[in-house]
Image (spheres, coloured by chain):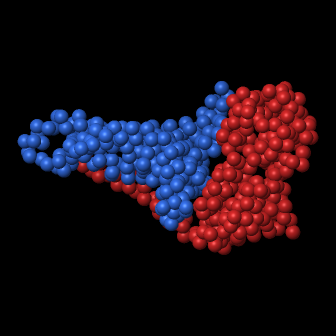
Amino acid sequence: MNRTLFVAAPILVLGLTLLPGLSGVRADEGAYITVASTTSTENSGLFGYLLPAFTEKTGIEVRVVAVGTGQAIRIAMNGDADVLFVHHRESEERFVDEGYGVKRYPVMHNDFVIVGPATDPAGIRGMEDAAAALAAIANADQPFASRADDSGTHKKEISLWAAADIDPTGASGSWYRETGSGMGATLNTASAMGAYALTDRGTWIKFGNKGDLQLLVEGDPRLFNPYGVILVSPDRFPHVKAREGQAFIDWLMSEQGQQRIAAYRIDGQPAFFPDAVP
Amino acid sequence: MTDFVNAFRTAFELIVGLDPELVRIVTLSLQISLAAVLAATVIALPLGAAVALLRFPGRRAVVILLNAAMGLPPVVVGLVVYLLLSRAGPLGSFGLLFTPTAMIVAQCILVMPIIAALTRQTITDLHEEYDEYLRSVGAGPLRSIGTLIRDGRFRLLTAVLAGFGRAIAEVGAVLIVGGNIQNVTRVMTTTIALETSKGNLALALGLGLILIIVATTINGLAMAVGEAAESRHG
């Protein structure tokens, strides 16, 4: 009897374990592309809204790896993605110039905002100059939670500190808190310690743990946040699915894709604005 | 406290409603972790038994290495597997990065030393009881390993379950090599990390409760099967 059990148990386990192999084979039969993108596009729910329409039209499945912009670019530079969809124009242009990407398409934009505790001890509420707002936070020695993860948002934050002529890293560990984490994790930290933070609007609207945090500064032209989409170079990486990847980019830039981006709402608010409306 | 109350409610609603996304994620988690544990067991049982029974130079060093490797940092294992499987890495041509297979490989590496080290200890203890018998029948090392694994299988179940516990609860490695792609490589732990980062703390905690329930159920089933078999055996 025990023999039966000890034969049956491994067979059960084997059966279960063979399934992912089989489903993997099934997934390989259908065309799919891998897109290296940012947490802001995935966590805001935009991809969940966009991708089914594209897959339905073309039959191409889109697999999104959502990480910080810096990491997404490195994934693409290793040839581990077919399409790069991120938000830091300088890095994107360098990516193309160095031969890793074919061409950068300006697909959409939204903007960054500065959030902070409702009591606003640094007094930045309503300021229109984002760099001056950061300077006020620094001068008041108020906690600021930085991504510090080489993401697009972090790169934007660094450029704003430079515009304010302040080097916050000297205060790292005191009022300047470098979380080294994604946008949501950094907002969780800011929420828990009553800190200020720079965030993209989409993630902010969708974020579920705002606590005492409020949107305090918006509208500075320097807070503009453009997204670019780039096909990883098939010349450099022969395994890149160039046809399917370009089909995805073409669809994003098409009237249907652009309209769909414009139609996406988070809690009734538009989160992304198309940049290629024909 | 509201987060805790909401977490229980969320977990309850997800389970009762058999949320299809949840079912998919739980199934994938089980498939990946069971596959990893199975592969690791196939390597680790003979390896652990061999280290316990055979006398060879450097054996103590191997024992120390195996014991130390029980604490392998998942993030580091994930990073190494990532670099190996990346298109820029030595195994890149297989295109395995960001697939369930990559996650199985990473978990297998994490789990194998745990099962091997616990097997070694179990077999060492068992060998003291069996030494005389094995000598009397003139069993060689290979036959001894086979006999001890077969007769120690109930005790070895604990080693395998320890490995499974590590595999199913681990997030650092599978996040890096799997990429947390929806419907493809998203498992329980990476979903919990994702929902936490979205600030959906109650949902994340609810999923955590479900993970604990799943792990407890698997352990309970394994123990029940083992004990039923043992009582019939005895």
Whether residue A43 is visible to the viewer of this picture, yes or no, is: no
Whether residue A144 is visible to the viewer of this picture, yes or no, is: yes
Of A217 and A161, nearer the camera is A161
Percent x, y for residue B192? Answer: 60, 42
Residue located farthest toward the left when viewing the structure as drawn = B136
Residue A264 lies left or right of residue B56; in this view the side is right
Percent x, y for residue B190? Answer: 58, 46
Residue A37 lies left or right of residue A199; in this view the side is left
- Residue visible at 85% across and 47% down in the picture: A223
Q: Is residue A143 above or below residue B62?
A: above
Quadrant in which the C terminus of chain A appears: bottom right
- Residue visible at 69% across and 36% down in the picture: A178
Residue A238 lies left or right of residue A210; in this view the side is left
Q: Is residue B91 above or below residue B79?
A: below
The blue one among the chains is B
Percent x, y for residue A134? Answer: 84, 36
- Residue visible at 76% across and 33% down in the picture: A144
Of A213 and B50, nearer the camera is B50
Q: Quadrant of residue A235?
A: bottom right
- Residue visible at 70% across and 61% down in the picture: A95
Q: Quadrant of residue A59?
A: bottom right
Q: Which color was chain A given?
A: red
